[in-house]
Image: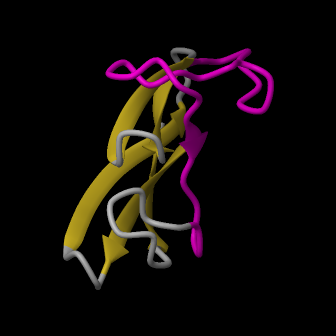
Amino acid sequence: MGHTIIYQCKKCEVFRTEDVGVGMMGVGSELCACYNCHRYVLKKLKRNMNLGETGLKCPYCRKKIEPIGHGDNCPVCASPIDAEPFGLWD
């Protein structure tokens, strides 16, 4: 089961609503941050992926990216991000 999450950075006015996690079909996505090229990256996932060990890479610069959570730094301006659950999906 996945979550619908609202990501918001009040300083640079980023506002995104994303369906993250993995559903019943075994596929899903995760919103990640590339702190090298200062982008948000929506990365596709499969059921058996462990986010800490997958070596997720930015499709633009090929550097390591990390999933974004509440309180993490915005990749654009480095301010804290608000990540609030909005709903569930499957």
- Counting from the top left corner in percent of width and height, residue 74 is at 43, 65
Q: Identify the image quadrant of residue 12.
A: bottom left
Q: From where the camera sits, is residue 1 visible? A: no
* Residue at image location 68% in from the left, 20% down from the top: 55
Q: Position of residue 47 (x, y in %)?
A: 65, 18
Which residue is drawn at the image coordinates 59% and 23% (left, top)?
56
The question of residue 34 being in magenta is answered with no
Image coordinates of residue 4 in percent, x first then y, are 41, 55
Where is the N terminus found, in terms of image quarters? top right
Residue at 52% x, 67% y: name it: 73
Name the side, left or right, on which 10 lies relative to 58. left
Residue at 37 percent of width and 34 percent of height: 42
Please identify the quarter of the rendering in which residue 15 is found: bottom left
Instruction: Name the foreground residue: 17 vs 36.
Output: 36
Magenta-drawn segment:
46-72
Q: Can residue 61 be seen in the rendering of this structure?
A: yes
Residue 70 on the magenta span: yes
In the rendered image of this protein, does residue 48 appear above or below residue 58? above
Front-lying residue, 56 or 25? 56
Say if 59 sits above or below 39 in the image: above
| Number of marks present in the image shown | 0
Main SS of the magenta part reads loop
The colour scheme used here is secondary structure
Indicate whether 31 appears above or below 49. Answer: below
